[in-house]
Amino acid sequence: MLILGAVITASLTLLVSCKREEVGYPLRTTVKEIPLLEAQGVNLVGWDEKGRKSWELQADSGVQFPQRMSLSQVKLNLLENGRPASEGVAQRVTVDNRTSNLVLKGDVKFVSYVDGAELFTSELEWIASEKKLQTEEKILLKRGNLFIEGWGLVANPDLSQIEIKNNPTTRLIERKSSLKNTQEIQGVDKG
């Protein structure tokens, strides 16, 4: 009995004298995404609710994750009612696998097939359900000799209707043809 009492006393002493450490868990844990697939020379097609092509995309390379796809050096064609509306390029594109939304980043440029209008920005999103392009970033739109700058944009895929959200500034740049320049070009020795 004396031995049992000594063991209990020693155990209690150890438990009481041991310093209890609380393990802290961060509020937000970062989970590393594991790629499912990596590919070179990627071609993708997005479809609308009526079964028509909504967009066609070509990329130099891509990585597939469970919820998204990340692509590099991308060319994108947007379609309206199955017909080409505009063509764009971007350094990187993220495709949301659930919604077919696209986020284009890095020197984004779009050209309208309707009138040749050009849109430049650093980030642009294609919202598949609304069939709209949008951004909150700075934009430059060139339509002929009309230049429009501003912040934020909502546009149709063919750039025919555009809403610039903040600080739109419009400039008209006149193009003057110089007779001297024309003569110099024509006078180049072709031999």
Image: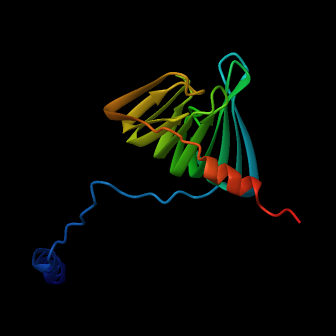
Residue at left offset 59%, top offset 43%? 177
| Residue 71, horizontal then vertical, whole percent | 62, 52
Residue 100 in the image: x percent, y percent? 59, 34
User: Which residue is pictured at 13% across the width and 75% down the height?
Assistant: 12
| Count of labels in the image | 0
Is 83 on the left or on the right of 181, as rendered?
Answer: right
**Does the rendering let one see residue 60?**
no
Q: Quadrant of residue 98?
A: top right
Residue at 63%, 33% in the rendered image = 116
Depth check, front residue: 86 or 178 = 178
Q: Nearer the viewer, residue 4 or 145?
A: 145
Residue 49 visible to an observer of this rendering: yes
What's the colour scheme? Answer: rainbow
Quarter of the picture holding the C terminus = bottom right
Tell me residue 29's x, y (percent).
36, 57
Tell whether 93 sits left or right of 76.
left
Q: Nearer the viewer, residue 169 or 100?
A: 169
Q: Nearer the viewer, residue 177 or 183?
A: 183
Q: Report the side of 16 relative to 65 (left or right).
A: left
Q: Position of residue 53 (x, y in %)?
A: 72, 26
* Quadrant holding the N terminus: bottom left
**Residue 151 lies in quadrant:** top left
Determine the residue located farthest toward the right in the rendered image: 191
